[in-house]
Image (cartoon, helix red, strand yellow):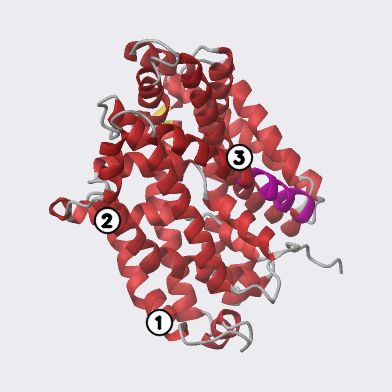
């Protein structure tokens, strides 16, 4: 039997898994969520939520993935003894695949904006930015062209395997991403009036704490770390027996949160410098931010051009690192369950994601045959995966590890078979068994507006 691939170094493990978690949720969703929910106070609650919910959930998926050393569906099947709990693994694979379809569409938008920034098209009035975005996203060929190109780049990395593809790409892309972040942070913080944005980010107003803000922070921590998408469980299956799971989870969570804070240090100071509130929701990146850069660097158009290009390049890189992990979930599933070569499995996933992405993209152009119950196919996939599948998957994973998987297996994996301290294991099990399920259930019910 052929030995299963694994990551070749500790750095590769951390960068690859962090790359899977770091994505548009950090650079796009986090800033506008913070902007809408009180800034610094939201960030404090977010950090608490990462410790309370994110890290225990991540370690749970690490334990399941490494112990089974297989794709996500087979991992849950093995640990459940073939019971109905195996469906949680299949849910993770399906969730990752569905997210790949519409996530690829948004990633294609990032590439279009990189190109438009490069040729100098991203400038004008606020109305121009809104018109440009709507016209592009509702079109036929341009969004699809960028979608397919983005998926081809992802495919190229995946077919080269775990060490020569995923790990090598992570070691190249993640340092570039951090350099871009730091350059943009310095550029934004040096703008006149930027200090007001920095204060908004770091000086909490505790009067703004509400149940919705708290639940929003819990939800952001959950999505930002890519919980229940199959990515963490799949990557953990490539971990060696020497990998310290709790230590890796802490490092990855720190990197993920650091990227989110740096993104805030780009957007809040830049927005404050021109008096624009960074709370415009999903349109923040593609409509509001170009307008911010246009005004903030009005006296230095060349610098504005460079900053815009770097910013959308950052978005595209963040999207690519996440897409690689999502693609790998489905690829290794097909490879192992249907005994396909990696090339064939990856090709099937790339083609399927391209078809799914094309349909999601076309649904944004008011095409009635792709609109159901008043929602576009894109919005339906976003809602079903983000607000239903992810919370349910995370909830079931915690219940599965806490109450179904033998405690001996969990402790052996958590402590690396007794070579790592078990001091935090009782706390970990308490969080997974009781705290995380309640918190995730609260997020789920709140998103459906039941509470």
Q: CA distance from mark 2 to mark 3?
A: 28 Å
Residue occupied by mark 3: 320
Q: Is residue 417 magenta?
A: no
Q: Secondary structure at mark 1?
A: helix
Principal SS element in the magenta part?
Answer: helix
Q: Residue furthest left?
A: 207
Residue 381: tell me if it is visible.
no
Residue displayed at 43% across by 73% down: 399
Quadrant for residue 377, please give it: top left
Q: Secondary structure at mark 2?
A: helix
Give percent across and percent down for residue 216: 29, 51
Upstream in sequence: badge 2 or badge 3: 2
Residue occupied by mark 2: 215
Quadrant for residue 67, please give it: bottom right
Callout 2 crowding tier (Cα within 10 Å): few <14, some 14–19, many ≥20: many
Callout 1 crowding tier (Cα within 10 Å): few <14, some 14–19, many ≥20: few
Give percent across and percent down for residue 387: 37, 49
Q: Secondary structure at mark 3?
A: helix
Q: CA distance from mark 2 to mark 1?
A: 22 Å
Upstream in sequence: badge 2 or badge 1: 2
Quarter of the figure with the C terminus: bottom left
Residue occupied by mark 1: 427
Give percent across and percent down for residue 426: 43, 86
Residue displayed at 53% across by 73% down: 246
Q: Report the span colored magenta.
A: 163-174
Q: Is residue 153 left or right of residue 83?
A: right
Residue closest to the eye, 147 or 205: 205
């Amino acid at each position: 039997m052929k030995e299963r691939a694994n990551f070749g170094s500790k750095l590769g493990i951390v960068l690859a898994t962090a790359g899977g978690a770091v994505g548009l949720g950090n650079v796009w969703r986090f800033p506008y969520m913070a902007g809408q929910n009180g800034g610094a106070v939201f960030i404090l609650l977010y950090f608490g939520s990462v410790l309370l919910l994110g890290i225990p959930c991540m370690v749970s998926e690490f334990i399941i993935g490494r112990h089974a050393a297989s794709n996500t569906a087979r991992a849950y099947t093995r640990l459940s003894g073939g019971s109905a709990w195996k469906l949680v693994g299949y849910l993770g694979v399906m969730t990752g695949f569905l997210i790949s379809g519409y996530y690829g569409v948004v990633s294609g938008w990032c590439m279009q904006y990189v190109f438009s920034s490069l040729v100098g098209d991203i400038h004008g009035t606020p109305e121009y930015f809104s018109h440009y975005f709507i016209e592009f996203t509702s079109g036929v060929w341009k969004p699809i062209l960028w979608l397919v190109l983005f998926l081809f780049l992802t495919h190229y990395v995946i077919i080269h395997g775990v060490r020569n593809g995923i790990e090598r790409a992570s070691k190249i892309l993640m340092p570039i991403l951090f350099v871009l972040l730091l350059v943009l942070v310095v550029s934004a913080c040096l703008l006149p009036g930027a200090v007001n944005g920095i204060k908004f980010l770091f000086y909490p107003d505790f009067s703004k704490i509400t149940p919705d803000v708290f639940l929003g922070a819990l939800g952001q921590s959950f999505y930002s770390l890519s919980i229940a998408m199959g990515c963490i469980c799949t990557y953990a299956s490539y971990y060696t027996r020497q990998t310290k799971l709790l230590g890796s989870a802490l490092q990855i969570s720190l990197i993920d949160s650091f990227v989110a804070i740096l993104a805030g240090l780009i957007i809040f100071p830049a927005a404050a410098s021109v008096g624009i509130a960074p709370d415009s929701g999903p349109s923040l990146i593609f409509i509001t931010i170009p307008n911010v850069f246009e005004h903030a660097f009005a006296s230095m158009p060349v610098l504005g051009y460079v900053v815009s290009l770097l910013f959308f390049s950052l978005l595209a890189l963040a999207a690519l690192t996440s897409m690689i992990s999502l693609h790998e979930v489905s690829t290794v599933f097909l490879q192992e369950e249907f005994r396909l070569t990696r090339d064939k499995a990856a090709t099937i996933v790339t083609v399927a994601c391209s078809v799914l992405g094309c349909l999601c993209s076309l649904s944004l152009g008011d095409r009635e045959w792709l609109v159901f119950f008043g929602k576009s196919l894109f919005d339906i996939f976003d809602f079903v995966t983000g607000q239903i599948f992810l919370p349910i998957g995370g909830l079931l994973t915690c219940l599965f590890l806490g109450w179904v998987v033998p405690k001996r297996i969990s402790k052996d994996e958590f402590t690396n078979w007794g070579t790592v301290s078990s001091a935090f294991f009782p706390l970990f099990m308490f969080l997974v068994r009781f705290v995380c399920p309640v918190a995730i259930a609260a997020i789920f019910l709140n998103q459906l507006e039941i509470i």
